[in-house]
Amino acid sequence: MKYLKFILAGTLFGIVLSKAEVISWYRIYEMFHFQSFHMYGVIGSAVLLGIGIVYLIKKYKFKSIEGENITFVPKQMSIARYLIGGTIFGLGWALTGACPGPMFILVGKGIWSILIVIFGSVLGTFLYGVFRDKLPH
């Protein structure tokens, strides 16, 4: 029962992304070839919604489910950090046709070849953890 809210949120997230065709390889292909506004509209809507929600959280000082204050810690500003990280993320997305959230939705839809991508992403995360102290941040 403790994890039921997370299972429900994940299920809802999967349904919304499936119905919005965000997990469609064809939609991702269109986006990277600048042939359609579909994915840009979805991503832009998510960014605007996030900005609005963060604004409301800060303005009305909402609390978390556990009753704690929600705080936002400013990120360290570095152009190289975001440029290199964003490029690696985008290349991985373009090569595999999926970013982290949709990968698990694709497993749920029975596309088993995505397990290779999940294994690669877990391995990449592990290697980042191993070499994190040696990388420029």
Image (cartoon, rainbow, N blue to C red):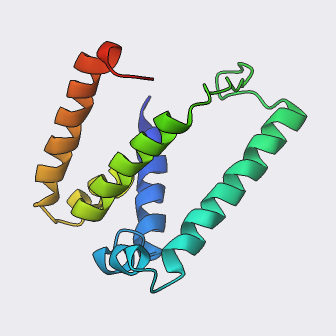
Residue 71 position (above or below residue 134):
below
Residue extending furthest toward the front: 80
Residue 60 position (above or below residue 92):
above
Q: Considering depth in this image, is 4 or 137 the residue closer to the camera?
A: 137
Quadrant housing residue 98: bottom left
Residue extending furthest toward the top: 133
Residue 50: percent from left, percent from top: 68, 50
Q: Quadrant of the C terminus?
A: top left
Identified at 40% across, 22% down, the residue is: 136
Identified at 64% across, 56% down, the residue is: 47
Identified at 71% across, 21% down, the residue is: 67
Quadrant housing residue 15: bottom left
Residue 79: percent from left, percent from top: 55, 38
Identified at 49% across, 48% down, the residue is: 9
Q: Is residue 30 left or right of residue 41?
A: left
Residue extending furthest toward the right: 59
Residue 110: percent from left, percent from top: 17, 65
> How many marks on residues?
0
